[in-house]
C-alpha cells in the first residue's frame, strides 16, 4: 500500500508538501513571536502556539490541494500559478475567520492570519519556482531503456516524458525491426546500457518473447542491471494496468488481488456508517432536489436503472431523474453525450454537481454497492464491452462503487475506448484495494466534485 500511496502522491510531491508545511508553520510562529512574544505570559514557543500554527498551515495546504496546486502539470504557467495560490490562500483566510468566530480560543493574535496570508502567497510562489528548478537541475533522474515498440510501450514513454515530476528520462527504444526512433536491436542492449548509463531496462514481453539474448541479459542482471516487465513499470508510474497484450499469467502471479474477510468486514462497516450519516445529514438537500425536479419537469423524481453488480448480479441503481421522462423510449440504451438534448436544464446542474447520484447512498445501505469501487455499468453495455475488451468481466469481482479510482483519474466515458481506459484504472484499484486507498479516493472525489471535472 505504501507503493500505491507514493504512486498517487509521488516522492517529489511529498517533498513539496512537507517543506511547504514547515515553511508556513515556521512563518506563523515567527510572526506571532514578533508581534506578541515580548508580552508577559506563557506564549513563546509553547505547545499551544505550535498547534495553532499547524492548524493555519493545515488549512492553507487543504485549500492549496483543492486548488490543484500539488498537481505539477496544472501549474506550469506562472500566471495561472499566481492566480490559483492567491485564490487558495484567500479562501483559507476566510475559513480561518469562520473558525475563529465559532472557536475564539484558537486565535493566536490579532493580525497574525492576515500577515501570514501575504507571506504564504510569497512563500508558495517562491518555493514552487525554486522546487521546479531543483527537480529539473539537481534531483536524480532514472534512465529507462524500453525493449519493444508496441502501442502500450510508446504510450508509456510519451506519458513519462510529459510528466516532469516523475524524474524519468527515456533513453530510447530497442526492437528487432529498425525504425526511426529505435536506437538498436536486441543484441545491442548490453552496449546501449553501458554507453548511455541506463538504470532500468523495461521489457515488453509481447514484443520480445523468444527473441532476447537471455544468457547475455542474465549476466547483466547478475552484474546489477535492473530489468522490469513493462506491465509492472506501467502500473507503477501511471496508476493503471495496461490490458493490451497483457497475459492472464501476469495477473495470476502478480502481487495484490487479495480479498480478505477482515478487509471486507471493515469496508462494509465504513460503507454503512458513512452512507447512513450522509442520508441523515443530507435529508434537507434531498427534499429540496425532489421538489425542484417535481416543479421543473414531468415524470417521477427518482429514476431506477438496472446495473451489473458484484459477480454479475443485477440490481437497480437509484438516481434523481436528470432526463426527460421516457428518454430512451425510442433510442433504447445509449450513452449520454455532451449536449444531450434528453437532459433537462435542472438535470444538467444535478449531473455537473453529481447531486443526481446522492440516492445511491441507499444502494450502499442495501449492500448492492460500496462507497468506492468500479462504477456499475448497464447490462446492455456490459455484454458488448466484455466481447470487445479483454478482462472486462474481472471488474465485477468486487462491489461497484459510488466513486472509484477511474472516476478521479479519468473523465466521463461514453465510448469503448473510454471503457478500456477506465478498466485499466479499475483493475489497478482491485489489485491494490485497501481502506487507506478508499479514503484517498474519497478525498480526491471531493476535489473532483468541487472542481466539477468529468461531469
Image: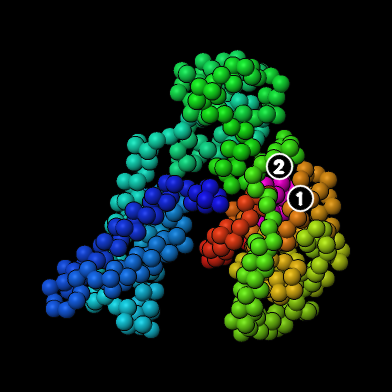
Quadrant location, the C terminus: bottom right
Above or below for 120 versus 360:
above
Q: Residues within 10 Å of mark 2 (few under 14, many from 20)?
A: some
Does label 1 or label 2 sit earlier along the sequence? 2
Provide the residue span drawn in magenta. Answer: 412-426
Look at mark 2 in the image and give the residue it sits on: 251
How far from the left and from the top, in percent, is residue 208?
A: 67, 24
**Is any part of residue 437 visible from this angle?**
yes
Residue at the image point whose x is 38% and y is 41% from the top: 135
Q: Residues within 10 Å of mark 1 (few under 14, many from 20)?
A: some
How far from the left and from the top, in percent, is residue 445?
A: 57, 63
Q: Is residue 29 left or right of residue 301?
A: left
Name the chief secondary structure element in magenta: helix
Foreground residue among 404 and 252: 252
How far from the left and from the top, in percent, is residue 435?
A: 59, 61
* Magenta segment includes 172: no
Disc 1 versus disc 2: nearer the observer: 2
Residue at the image point whose x is 53% and y is 63% from the top: 443
* Magenta segment includes 418: yes
Element type where label 1 sits in the image: helix
Look at mark 1 in the image and give the residue it sits on: 394
Q: State the image quarter where residue 317 is shown.
A: bottom right
Above or below for 268 versus 379:
below
Q: Is residue 267 left or right of residue 306?
A: left
Q: Is residue 82 left or right of residue 283?
A: left
Residue at the image point whose x is 62% and y is 33% from the top: 229
Above or below for 302 versus 145:
below
Q: Are marks 1 and 2 in contact (CB under 8 Å)?
A: yes
Amino acid at each position: 500500500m505504501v507503493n500505491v500511496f507514493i504512486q498517487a502522491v509521488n516522492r517529489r510531491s511529498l517533498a513539496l508538501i512537507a517543506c511547504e508545511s514547515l515553511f508556513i508553520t515556521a512563518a506563523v510562529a515567527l510572526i506571532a513571536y514578533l508581534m506578541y512574544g515580548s508580552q508577559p505570559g506563557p506564549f513563546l514557543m509553547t505547545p499551544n502556539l505550535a498547534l495553532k500554527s499547524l492548524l493555519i498551515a493545515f488549512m492553507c495546504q487543504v485549500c492549496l490541494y483543492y486548488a490543484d496546486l500539488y498537481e505539477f502539470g496544472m501549474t506550469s504557467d506562472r500566471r495561472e500559478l499566481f492566480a490559483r495560490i492567491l485564490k487558495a490562500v484567500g479562501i483559507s483566510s476566510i475559513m480561518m475567520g469562520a473558525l475563529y468566530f465559532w472557536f475564539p480560543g484558537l486565535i493566536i493574535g490579532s493580525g497574525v492570519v492576515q500577515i501570514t496570508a501575504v507571506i504564504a502567497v510569497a512563500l508558495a510562489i517562491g518555493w514552487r519556482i525554486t522546487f521546479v528548478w531543483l527537480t529539473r537541475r539537481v534531483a536524480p533522474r532514472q534512465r529507462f531503456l524500453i525493449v519493444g515498440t508496441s502501442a502500450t510501450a510508446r504510450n508509456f514513454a510519451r506519458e513519462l516524458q510529459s510528466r516532469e515530476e516523475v524524474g524519468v528520462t527515456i533513453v530510447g527504444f530497442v526492437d528487432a525491426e529498425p525504425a526511426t526512433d529505435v536506437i538498436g536491436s536486441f543484441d545491442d542492449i548490453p552496449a546501449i546500457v553501458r554507453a548511455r548509463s541506463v538504470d532500468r531496462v523495461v521489457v515488453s514481453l509481447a514484443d520480445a518473447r523468444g527473441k532476447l539474448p537471455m544468457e547475455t541479459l542474465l549476466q547483466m542482471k547478475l552484474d546489477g542491471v535492473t530489468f522490469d516487465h513493462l506491465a509492472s513499470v506501467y502500473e507503477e508510474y501511471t496508476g493503471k494496468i495496461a490490458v493490451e497484450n497483457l497475459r492472464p499469467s501476469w495477473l495470476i502471479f502478480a502481487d495484490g488481488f487479495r480479498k480478505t474477510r477482515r478487509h471486507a468486514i471493515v469496508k462494509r462497516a465504513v460503507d454503512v456508517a458513512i452512507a447512513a450519516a450522509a442520508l441523515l445529514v443530507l435529508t434537507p438537500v434531498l427534499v429540496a432536489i425532489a421538489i425542484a425536479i417535481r416543479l421543473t419537469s414531468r415524470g417521477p423524481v427518482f429514476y431506477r436503472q438496472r446495473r451489473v453488480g458484484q459477480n454479475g448480479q443485477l440490481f437497480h441503481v437509484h438516481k434523481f431523474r436528470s432526463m426527460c421522462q421516457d428518454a430512451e423510449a425510442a433510442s433504447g440504451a445509449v450513452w449520454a453525450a455532451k449536449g444531450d438534448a434528453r437532459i433537462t436544464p435542472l438535470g444538467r446542474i444535478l449531473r455537473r454537481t453529481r447531486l443526481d447520484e446522492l440516492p445511491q447512498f441507499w444502494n450502499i445501505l442495501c449492500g448492492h454497492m460500496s462507497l468506492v469501487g468500479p462504477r456499475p455499468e448497464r447490462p446492455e453495455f456490459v455484454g458488448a464491452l466484455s466481447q470487445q475488451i479483454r478482462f472486462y468481466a474481472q471488474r465485477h469481482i468486487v462491489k461497484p462503487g459510488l466513486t472509484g479510482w477511474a472516476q478521479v483519474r479519468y473523465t466521463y466515458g461514453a465510448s469503448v475506448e473510454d471503457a478500456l481506459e477506465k478498466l485499466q484504472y479499475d483493475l489497478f484499484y482491485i489489485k491494490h484495494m485497501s481502506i487507506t486507498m478508499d479514503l484517498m479516493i474519497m478525498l480526491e472525489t471531493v476535489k473532483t466534485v468541487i472542481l466539477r471535472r468529468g461531469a
